[in-house]
Image (cartoon, helix red, strand yellow):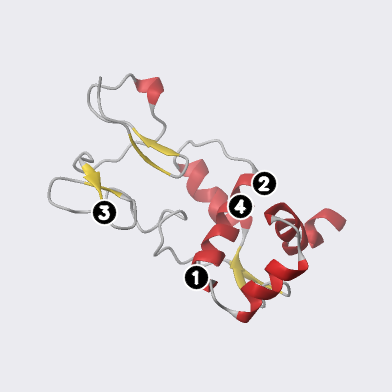
């Protein structure tokens, strides 16, 4: 049985795996371990996840929209969806919103806005609902 390498919802298809065991095909050298960010790396220490993947910690979206709740521009759901669609991965809008929020949290821990959200809302689902409330009313 082959080692399984994952990153978030991605399960890297590697040699020796049945095709239906994974969902992400990396066209570079196969992963053999993980780096300090938890991203699979190859035998040369190179990441097996392109920076154009919205799940990559260094990803920067070209399509953003200002959000009053986070007080900054956030990537749009459609900008994330395009990458998942291009890689034949099925993901819901709800999942995408959680990935966007997780990315925002990772970049804003310790900020006043982060602490304000923690004090004003009971849980992550409430925060996400508030961030994308305009979608629910339009």
Asked if the residue under mark 1 is in contact with the one under mark 3, i.e. CB atoms within 8 Å, the reply is: no
Find disc 2 in the rendering and name its residue.
94
The residues bearing labels 2 and 4 have C-alpha atoms spaced at a distance of: 6 Å
Asked if the residue under mark 4 is in contact with the one under mark 3, i.e. CB atoms within 8 Å, the reply is: no
Earlier in the chain: of badge 1 and badge 4, it is 4
Asked if the residue under mark 4 is in contact with the one under mark 2, i.e. CB atoms within 8 Å, the reply is: yes
Mark nearest the camera among 3 and 4 is: 3
Q: Name the residue: 26% across, 41% down.
A: 27
Which residue is at the far left? 44
Q: Name the residue: 58% across, 40% down.
A: 91
Q: Is residue 138 in sight in this rendering?
A: no
Q: Secondary structure at mark 3?
A: loop
Residue 118 point in image, percent of width and height = 68, 67
The picture quadrant where one finds residue 113 is: bottom right
Earlier in the chain: of badge 3 and badge 4, it is 3
Q: Name the residue: 54% across, 53% down.
A: 80
The residues bearing labels 1 and 4 have C-alpha atoms spaced at a distance of: 14 Å
For residue 55, side relative to residue 50 (left or right)? right
Find disc 4 in the rendering and name its residue.
98
Q: Name the residue: 26% across, 54% down.
A: 35
Find disc 1 in the rendering and name its residue.
107
**Where the N terminus falls, by quadrant?**
top left
What is the crowding at mark 1: few (fewer than 14 residues within 10 Å), some, or many (at least 20)?
A: few
């Amino acid at each position: 049985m082959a080692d399984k390498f994952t990153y978030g919802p991605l399960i890297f298809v590697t040699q020796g795996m049945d095709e239906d065991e994974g969902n992400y095909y990396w066209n570079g050298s196969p992963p053999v371990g993980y780096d300090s960010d938890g991203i699979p790396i190859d035998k040369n220490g190179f990441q097996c996840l392109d920076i154009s993947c919205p799940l990559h910690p260094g990803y920067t979206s070209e399509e953003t929209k200002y959000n009053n709740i986070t007080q900054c521009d956030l990537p749009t759901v459609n900008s994330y969806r395009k990458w998942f669609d291009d890689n034949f991965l099925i993901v819901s809008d709800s999942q995408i919103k959680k990935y966007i929020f997780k990315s925002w949290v990772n970049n804003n821990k310790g900020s006043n806005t982060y602490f304000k959200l923690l004090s004003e809302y009971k849980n992550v689902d409430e925060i996400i609902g508030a961030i994308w409330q305009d979608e629910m009313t339009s």
